[in-house]
Amino acid sequence: MNVELFKDLIKDDRGNYYVAVYKQGNELLTLVNAMLERSYEDLLEFNEEFKHKFAEYEHQFIGKMIMDKVRHDVVFASKEDGHGRMHDLGKVMSEYRVMFIDMIEFYRNPRTGRL
């Protein structure tokens, strides 16, 4: 099994989704909740450009924008058409030593380049 960082989704038996953010060979895999990871994809600046880009979300919760991204990722990962794959957490844990990043831990998304 090859899990692609930031691309594949891993689902547990309770309906939670995770994204691999660090991998050490075929031994160690670090996972974070997919909604948390996706919340770091875009830097949101509340200005006119933001209002225009996200007009459909006016008067809604910020989390809905992020959940829609995760939902999109789930749909495409389930199709396995090159936009990522869906893996079962149990199977992943049988092949990797898995570490989880706690949701309330200060998360430094590796994509951001901020240290």
Image (cartoon, grey):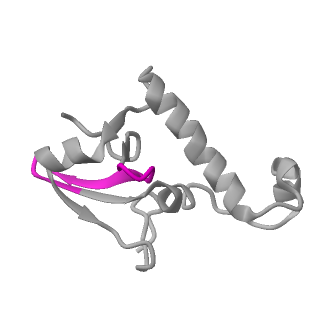
Where residue 14 appears, x then y in whole percent?
Answer: 41, 53
Quarter of the image with the N terminus in it:
top left
- Left or right of residue 105: residue 66: right
Look at 36% across and 49% down and name the residue there.
Answer: 13
Front in this rendered view, residue 8 or 109: 8
How many numbered markers are drawn? Answer: 0
> Which stretch did the figure color magenta?
12-29
Observer able to see residue 54: yes
Query: Is residue 13 one of those drawn in magenta?
Result: yes
Residue most extreme to the top:
81
Where residue 44 appears, x then y in whole percent?
Answer: 70, 63
Observer able to see residue 83: no
Compared to residue 5, the image places residue 36 above or below, namely below
Residue most extreme to the front:
14
Look at 40% across and 79% down and name the residue there.
Answer: 105
Give the quadrant of residue 81. top left
Quarter of the image with the C terminus in it:
bottom left
Where residue 86 appears, x then y in whole percent?
Answer: 38, 35
- Left or right of residue 101: residue 35: right
- Left or right of residue 106: residue 52: right
Query: Is residue 19 one of those drawn in magenta?
Result: yes
- Left or right of residue 114: residue 72: right
Give the quadrant of residue 102. bottom left
Look at 86% across and 47% down and name the residue there.
Answer: 56
Front in this rendered view, residue 52 or 11: 11
